[in-house]
Image (tube, rainbow, N blue to C red):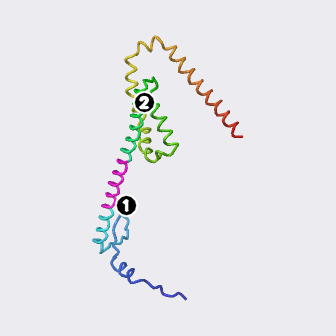
Amino acid sequence: MKQPSKIPKKQEQKTANHKSVNIKNDEGKPEVKNEDYASNTENESNTDSIAFTKRQQLATLVKNTLQLVLGLLIIMMFLSIAKMIVSYFEVTFPASILGMLMLFVALSLGIIKLSWIEFTGNLFLKYLALLFIPIGVGLVNYFELIATHWLVIIFSLFFTTLFTLFMVGHCYQWLSREER
């Protein structure tokens, strides 16, 4: 024999506020929908959740902006230090490469945390192809020089690529042999 279920008072009140209404859908078939008499309270809570979502969006925007600015400041700081070192010692080594090496060392030693520059780095990587457009346009100015020396350029590109692959392969084999 089934026992009658006990419904809490709040649930009784909630079910009492609903009424069934017959509505025809787009195909002309009848549907039964529940209308809520307490829709004003639900609309207020929906408005609160939408406002909360807008607050979350604003907070995310502010957080991403601050992460971007922090990452840019750190990267530019290392680039500026590298430029000062290169200009002080009058070395022909590129300052951008020296700055990246210094940043790599700082990350490896734990001086700089990856999370500080990760957002900015990912953003730069996402739009990296866009940064090559000025270089491609600049090559048009040197079309005659490229046309006269195309064989040397192709040979050097091919040779340096093969040489790099060869050296990386041998270094990897040498390092993996030492680990055993």
Residue drawn at x 55%, y 17% is 155
Find residue 18 and report its horizontal and vertical position in percent: 34, 76
Q: Is 61 inside the magenta-drawn segment?
A: yes
- N-terminal label among 1 and 2: 1
Question: Which amino acid, by three-letter code, is at mark 2?
Answer: Ile
Residue drawn at x 64%, y 34% is 172
Give the structural element (helix, strand or loop) at label 2: helix
Q: Quadrant of residue 170?
A: top right
Find residue 28 and report its horizontal and vertical position in percent: 35, 63
Mark 2 burial class by Cα count in 10 Å: few <14, some 14-19, many 20+: some
Nearest to the observer: residue 44 or residue 68:
68
Find residue 108 and report its horizontal and vertical position in percent: 52, 42
Q: Which mark is residue 85?
A: 2
In 3D space, how far apart are the residues under numbered discs 1 and 2 (Cα atoms)? 76 Å
Q: Which mark is residue 5?
A: none
Nearest to the observer: residue 129 or residue 177:
177
Question: Which amino acid, by three-letter code, is at mark 1?
Answer: Glu
Which region is colored magenta? 50-66
Mark 1 burial class by Cα count in 10 Å: few <14, some 14-19, many 20+: few
Q: Main secondary structure of the magenta part?
A: helix
Q: Quadrant of the C terminus?
A: top right
Residue under pointer 1: 27
Q: Which dot, 1 or 2, sits closer to the camera?
A: 2
